[in-house]
Image (spheres, rainbow, N blue to C red):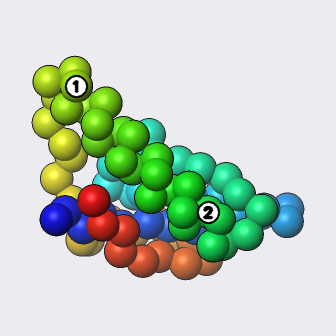
Amino acid sequence: MLTYKAAYRFVDGVVHGEVLDFPGTITSAADLDEARRLLASALVDMAETNLALGEPLPSPDPTVADPGADIEEPIHL
């Protein structure tokens, strides 16, 4: 299992989420629970795409941070 870092921001009544150490893995949702679920699904989709294209998965970086995030937490692949 790989552990990446998810970051969430509460903006204008919605939640924006991204995996900080897996570029391009983003989502937006009405609430945090939905954002977590959608971001986990987006992470799987991005990983499957990388592998289908013969590209390596990015290495998790536990030191990556987003100073503007409201929440940062691990996300597992």
- Residue reaching furthest to the top: 53
Residue 53 in view: yes
Q: Which residue is mark 1?
A: 52
- The reply, left or right, for residue 24 in relation to residue 62 is right
* Secondary element type, mark 2: helix
Q: Position of residue 27 (x, y in %)?
A: 59, 50
Task: Please tell me which residue is depicted at 66% across the width and 72% down the height of the picture.
Answer: 32
- The reply, left or right, for residue 69 in relation to residue 15 is left
Residue 15 vertical placement versus 23 (above, below): below
Residue 61 in view: no
> Quarter holding the N terminus?
bottom left
Which quadrant of the figure has residue 35?
A: bottom right
Q: Position of residue 58 (x, y in %)?
A: 21, 46
Q: Position of residue 63 (x, y in %)?
A: 26, 71
Residue 35, numbered label:
2
The residue carrying pointer 1 sits among few (fewer than 14), some (14 to 19) or many (20 or more) residues within 10 Å by Cα, namely few
Task: Please tell me which residue is depicted at 36% across the width and 68% down the height of the picture.
Answer: 75
User: How many angstroms separate mark 2 from mark 1 (CA)?
Assistant: 25 Å
> Quarter holding the C terminus?
bottom left
Q: Position of residue 18 (x, y in %)?
A: 50, 55
- The reply, left or right, for residue 64 in relation to residue 39 is left
Mark closest to the chain's N terminus, 2 or 1: 2
Residue 46 vertical placement versus 19 (above, below): above
Task: Please tell me which residue is depicted at 44% across the width and 58% down the height of the picture.
Answer: 40
* Secondary element type, mark 1: helix
Task: Please tell me which residue is depicted at 31% across the width and 30% down the height of the picture.
Answer: 49
